[in-house]
């Protein structure tokens, strides 16, 4: 007879199987959650990344950049805290050459300068802006800012009433209101103050401002170099026996005469650097102002000299030939020095390679221009006289009976 299974044993086995199945399900659930993160967790990580490197606005060029690509000044207010690293580098580069952007331009013009500098930098092949390009851009912005001024002064001259009538002015109002002056040849003359603005004047003044700032920075660097050179050299490393002997014998100090001599030497060097800096500033200013005139007179002199060589039946006297050759040589040298000087100043280079005799001021350059014009007149007079003589030989007057 078959044995009947116990009901209680069957119940206990089924309960154990149920508990095992539940344990397997509970163990597999955490494993699945650990291996597959939820979509919400991914979104949270992305938001944390954005918060870690947010976008900030550059106070210089107004561009939005990542916070990691900007320099932060915590003491400033929120809209002035951040400066992008390219603008920071450009501002530092200009400061090294003595140019303070906030002093050279207004706030709006400074923003326009940094915006255009950013565009030039991004369009460049190396994504960088050289100092010469930044200086040229700054000068352009300074000239444009100065051009907004209505006038820089009054300009007027005494002229006859007919002169002003030909210009289209109301002669009756001029005779009633203008300043009047008697001229020994022209008679009554009238002066009208006319406000005008010269582009050449604005360019010259702007160049002088930039050169002054650069020269001041160069002088400060030279002063620091001179002070370092005048300082006594560091003491050499001493071995223990030598140090012991010096301590026992007593330390040797500079005498008052030696200290006074060192101070006088440093003072003389500072004065020499200051004198040289003023000389360079004056020479650069004169070169920027008179270089166009030098080139113009030089071209006129070359043309006049060529005409003298075309005269076949006569030659220049030794004195006239010397006058023309000396004037041409002085003009060529002045143009060469002025051109190289302005190029070096634009690149921020030192002018130490030029001697003091090469740094000509405005008065000396004007003398070169004057001598050049005189040489042109000498050549033109020679050509004219020979033309008249040739014409007289071709067309002699009637013979006397």
Image: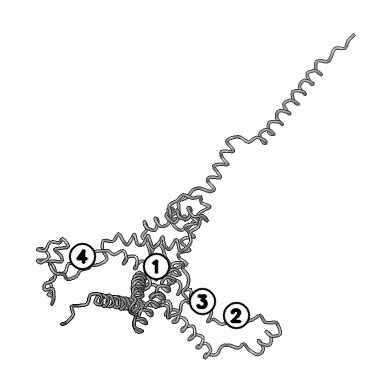
Tell which circle, 2 or 1, labels the residue nearer the N-terminal end.
1
Residue behind mark 1: 210
Give the SS element for disc 3.
helix
Cα gap from disc 2 to disc 1, whole angstroms: 38 Å
Q: Residue at x 53, y 48 (%)?
A: 53
Percent coordinates x, y for residue 223 in the rendering: 48, 77
On the rendered structure, is 392 left or right of 43?
A: left
Q: Quadrant of residue 232?
A: bottom right
> Quick one: quadrant of the C terminus?
bottom left
Q: Is residue 275 above or below residue 155?
A: below
Tell which circle, 2 or 4, labels the residue nearer the N-terminal end.
4
Q: Quadrant of residue 176?
A: bottom left
Q: Nearer the viewer, mark 1 or mark 4?
A: 4
Residue behind mark 4: 194
Q: Nearer the viewer, mark 2 or mark 1?
A: 1
Q: Is residue 171 above or below residue 392?
A: above
Q: Residue at x 41, y 60 (%)?
A: 137
Cα gap from disc 1 to disc 3, whole angstroms: 23 Å
Tell which circle, 4 or 3, labels the residue nearer the N-terminal end.
4
Task: Compare residues 108 and 7 and report the one nearer the observer.
Answer: 108
Disc number placed over residue 234 in the picture, else none: 2
Cα gap from disc 2 to disc 4, whole angstroms: 66 Å
Task: Compare residues 322 and 244 and report the one nearer the observer.
Answer: 322
Give the SS element for disc 4.
strand
> Quick one: quadrant of the N terminus?
top right
Residue behind mark 3: 225
Q: Is residue 44 visible?
A: yes
Q: Nearer the viewer, mark 2 or mark 3?
A: 3
Q: Quadrant of residue 135?
A: bottom left
Cα gap from disc 1 to disc 4, whole angstroms: 29 Å
Task: Compare residues 175 and 272 and report the one nearer the observer.
Answer: 175
Tell which circle, 1 or 3, labels the residue nearer the N-terminal end.
1
């Amino acid at each position: 007879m078959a044995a009947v299974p116990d009901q209680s044993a069957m119940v206990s086995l089924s309960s154990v199987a149920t508990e095992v199945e539940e344990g397997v399900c509970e163990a597999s659930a955490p494993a699945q959650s650990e291996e597959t993160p939820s979509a919400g967790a991914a979104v949270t990580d992305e938001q944390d990344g954005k918060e870690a490197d947010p976008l900030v606005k550059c106070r210089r060029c107004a561009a939005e950049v990542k916070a990691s690509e900007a320099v932060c000044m915590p003491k400033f207010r929120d809209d002035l805290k951040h400066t992008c690293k390219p603008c920071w580098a450009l501002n530092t580069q200009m400061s090294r050459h003595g140019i303070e952007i906030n002093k050279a331009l207004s706030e709006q013009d400074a923003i326009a300068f940094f915006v255009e500098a950013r565009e030039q930098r991004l369009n460049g092949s190396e994504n960088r802006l050289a100092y010469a390009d930044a200086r040229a851009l700054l000068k352009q912005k300074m000239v444009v800012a100065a051009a907004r001024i209505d006038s820089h002064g009054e300009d007027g001259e005494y002229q006859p009433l007919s002169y002003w009538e030909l210009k289209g002015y109301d002669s009756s109002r001029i005779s009633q209101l203008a300043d009047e002056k008697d001229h020994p040849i022209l008679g009554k003359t009238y002066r009208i103050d006319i406000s005008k603005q010269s582009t050449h004047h604005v360019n010259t003044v702007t160049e002088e401002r930039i050169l002054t700032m650069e020269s001041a920075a160069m002088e400060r660097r030279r002063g620091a170099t001179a002070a370092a050179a005048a300082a006594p050299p560091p003491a050499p490393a001493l071995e223990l026996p030598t140090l012991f002997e010096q301590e026992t014998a007593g330390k040797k100090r500079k005498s008052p005469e030696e200290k006074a001599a060192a101070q006088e030497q440093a003072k003389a060097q500072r004065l020499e650097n200051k004198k040289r800096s003023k000389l360079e500033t004056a020479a650069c200013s004169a070169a920027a102002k008179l270089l166009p005139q030098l080139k113009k007179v030089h071209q006129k002199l070359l043309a006049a000299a060529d005409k003298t060589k075309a005269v076949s039946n006569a030659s220049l006297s030794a004195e006239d030939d010397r006058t023309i050759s000396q004037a041409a040589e002085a003009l060529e040298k002045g143009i060469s020095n002025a051109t190289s000087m302005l190029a070096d100043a634009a690149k921020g280079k030192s002018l130490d390679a030029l001697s003091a005799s090469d740094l000509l001021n405005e008065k000396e350059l004007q003398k070169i221009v004057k001598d050049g014009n005189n040489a042109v007149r000498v050549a033109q007079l020679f050509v004219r006289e020979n033309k008249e003589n040739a014409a007289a030989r071709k067309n002699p007057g009637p013979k006397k009976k």
